[in-house]
Amino acid sequence: GEDVEQSLFLSVREGDSSVINCTYTDSSSTYLYWYKQEPGAGLQLLTYIFSNMDMKQDQRLTVLLNKKDKHLSLRIADTQTGDSAIYFCAETSIGSYIPTFGRGTSLIVHP
Amino acid sequence: DAGVIQSPRHEVTEMGQEVTLRCKPISGHNSLFWYRQTMMRGLELLIYFNNNVPIDDSGMPEDRFSAKMPNASFSTLKIQPSEPRDSAVYFCASSQQGGHTEAFFGQGTRLTVV
């Protein structure tokens, strides 16, 4: 089946930028998503990008999409301790509304 | 809307017992998903319902697992008999199909089978 890959951990210092990367295999992906999971909670949508875009910015969040390389990234500017969470990359493709999730990247923000 | 509601939040049961997890999706959503999350395997899709009909149950691990959606506002995931390796957090999510599809997740049920 289709696959979404992410690194499992990222550690950054408070105030620095965080970049979380994701690769996917489905060439028919239409939407790509970033979800955030805080401890003890379910996943919550942070942002998404349509596959014909290459960048989307939303306050401190910047999503970059390289469709040729099937690479998606999430940049968090001025990372705060409240950003510590697990971040999931996901995609949906033409004709399928079932999101395929990556394993999630645990972001650890230290002072 | 209160969001996707799952119950119970925590369940501890003995091996061999039947476990039933419950989910109330967001009103008006026509898709419902059950996921299982573990450290080893991440987030796995167990089953997907569309308009109360199971569309894809290829992720259901084995016959001990069953899921139902008798109406648009309720779904259950049953494990009978439960085993220690079923210990995980089980999430229910719902969405409204069309365009970009945001999945709304419940808080999850943490299941421990001893």
Image (cartoon, rainbow, N blue to C red):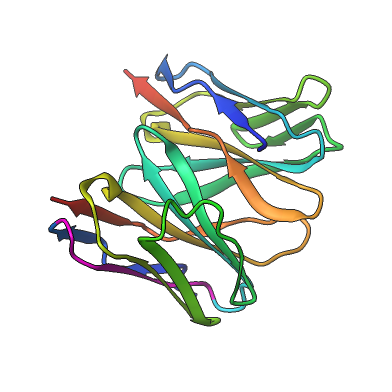
Is residue B19 rendered magenta in the image? yes
Is residue B94 rendered magenta in the image? no
Instruction: Please give left or right for residue B84 compared with residue B72 in the image.
Output: left
Q: Position of residue A63 (x, y in %)?
A: 68, 31
Range of the magenta residues? Answer: B15-26
Q: Residue at x 70, y 56 (%)?
A: A97
Q: Residue at x 43, y 43 (%)?
A: A37
Residue B100 appears in view: no
Residue B82 appears in view: yes
Instruction: Please give left or right for residue B12 compared with residue B58 in the image.
Output: left
Q: Residue at x 47, y 74 (%)?
A: B68
Q: In the image as oriented, which residue stretches furthest toward the front?
A: B63
Q: In the image as oriented, which residue stretches furthest toward the right?
A: A52
Q: Position of residue A20 (x, y in %)?
A: 56, 23
Q: Position of residue A81 (x, y in %)?
A: 36, 29
Q: Residue at x 44, y 23 (%)?
A: A8
Q: Nearer the viewer, residue B43 or A60?
A: B43
The image shows residue A23, relative to residue B14, as above or below, that is above
